[in-house]
Amino acid sequence: MPLIGIEGLSKSYMMGKIELRVLNNINLTIQEGEFVSIVGPSGSGKSTLMNILGCLDTPTKGRYYLDGTDVASLSGGRLAEIRNKKIGFVFQSFNLLPRLTAMENVELPLIYRGMQSKEQRERAVGALEMVGLGDRTNHRPSELSGGQQQRVAIARAVVGNPPIILADEPTGNLDSVSGREIMGLLQNLHRSGATIIVITHDSDIAQRAGRIFSIKDGVITETGRGEAV
Amino acid sequence: MNLNLVQTLRMAIASILSNKMRSFLTMLGVIIGVSAVITLVSLGEGSTRSVTEHIQSMGSNLLTVNITGRGTSTSLTYNETRELRDLPGVLYVAPSLASQATVKYGSISSDNASLESTTPEYQYVQNYRVSSGRFLLENDITQRQRTAVIGKEIVDELFPFHNPVGERIKINGQTFTVIGVLEEKGTSAMGSGDNKVIIPITTGQRLAGNTGIRTVYIQAASPEQVDTAELYLNNYLIKKFKSEDGYRIFNQSEMLSTISEVTGILTATLAGIAGISLLVGGIGIMNIMLVSVTERTREIGIRKALGAKHANILVQFLIEAVVISGLGGIIGIIFGISGSMVISNLAGFNTVISVNVILLASMFSILVGVIFGIYPANKAALLNPIDALRYE
């Protein structure tokens, strides 16, 4: 059974009386342990696909099987639970909470899992050490560089051991050196067994993945293989 | 639903501390409301209590008969007042003749003593006790003794340095022997109880050359028998005066309940006015919480993306509102208690800080947090995570 199975998925929005179809009859299968990149220009529907893959949004039509569950028709509460346990998000703009320390930011997904504070702490420290920030646990985001902030975000994404890491333009706000570091980190995660989906408009970044998909006008096609095959 | 309350509470406190000035100003509404409720209610209850205590000190089962003198006869005789004792429900009867008098001891004199001629039962009816010597006895009445029991104020004026019992004083020029000193009663709105001079009624009648009695204090056997006694008194007096206009009966317990009703309304009005300020404080909380939700839209989006459910966000913002209002409530209680203490010390008003009001005020302030926090919190919890994440 694939980790992600999408069958005939469509998403449309109502703009007044006009139906705007953003995703059109998409089929996509991703196996456990794959490193996949989805490339597309802005307006191609890749953000919408990302939101649906991340269970932040539900499709208008079609099926989405995540780890064996059909999530297309789940309630908001169940979707929140799936986001918490099965998906680790890495955003372009990091999306750390500015008032919390690196440690507290990494603990957030575990809080919503209802974990004991002692275990939360141990796992957050472990995740921060894994991304090389073991000595920055009590810094706030404003005291960290962009690359470091994105590493905190990656630590937050992996702390709950989700099967899927979903990265939306993870290097988009970074200089090329930090960008390479972040991609290296994602590659390491992939090597240690995680399933990684990177959404980007940068074809160099996309080349680091195994399978490469491109999306245009709401239609997705597999376009090639990258270095991580 | 997984909720770690301690952690949520810590988050709420951190968020309140991150904007100290704003949180304090928001709290101020609740602080003012709660302290106003406590101060005003304790003031109201204090005045209720002092009025009630004063009335009760005059004897709680008291009926006062005033002869207005518009009937065929204009007063009662001493013997007629003795007959009143046999009426059902009546325990004590104390007829009274009252006037102003000048009291002299040697060369010292006191001008405005209030002279009251009465019987031994007066001490029970009006709750007087003697601190030294004795009160009037039946013998003083029958023998028309020239004996006097005097109040604390008279004693202080005429006998600053020694015990007056056994001394001879002159009341309106007539010589009397002091047989007792009344215990101090204190001054109140009804006048001083301590500048009294009490002499036997029979002696008083002879001195005044007037045997008509127009005031009789009557004590019923128990609070339940006040009405019975009043009924029989009415029957007796209407037979005597042939008209209801000839006399009036004042019922102490009726007066008491009327006064406590009035002061109760006063207290409730004060509490209501103060409660309105608490309501305004609540609106302030709601206002700030709505601003806070808008400001933190992105935070809410992030939390939702990381797995926060509707209830998690709701509880987070609700706890923030309740912490603000609860903290305001605690500070308000401290201010309210110290405020009423300051008022009673500086202005001399009687204040009663009741535990009930404090409990009510703290419950009300928490309730304000919940009621005015629930709408903003629910607004936050209902945000769509995609829109919230996109919010700049």
Image (cartoon, coloured by chain):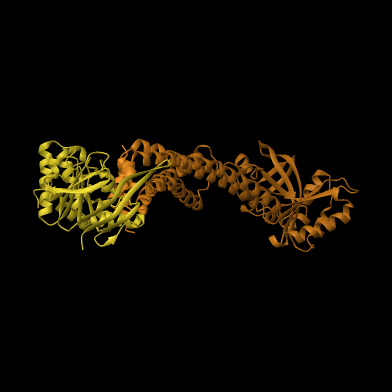
Chain colours: A yellow, B orange
Question: In the shown orientation, is residue A144 left or right of residue B73?
Answer: left
Instruction: Kindly indicate the quadrant of the structure image that contains residue B152.
Output: top right
Instruction: Kindly indicate the quadrant of the structure image that contains residue A101.
Output: top left
Report the label total. Answer: 0
Q: Position of residue B382 (x, y in %)?
A: 39, 48
Is any part of residue B182 visible from this angle? Answer: no
Q: Position of residue B54 (x, y in %)?
A: 63, 48
Q: Position of residue B13 (x, y in %)?
A: 32, 46
Q: Residue furthest right?
A: B72
Question: In the shown orientation, is residue A90 left or right of residue B198?
Answer: left
Front-most of B159 and A96?
A96
Question: In the shown orientation, is residue B157 left or right of residue B361?
Answer: right
Instruction: Kindly indicate the quadrant of the structure image that contains residue A202.
Output: top left
The residue sitting at 82% across, 56% down in the picture is B234
Q: Position of residue B248 (x, y in %)?
A: 80, 49
Front-most of B154 and A172?
A172
Locate the N terminus of chain A by quadrant. Answer: bottom left
Front-most of B307 and A187?
A187
Is any part of residue B109 visible from this angle? Answer: yes
Question: In the shown orientation, is residue B152 left or right of residue A72?
Answer: right
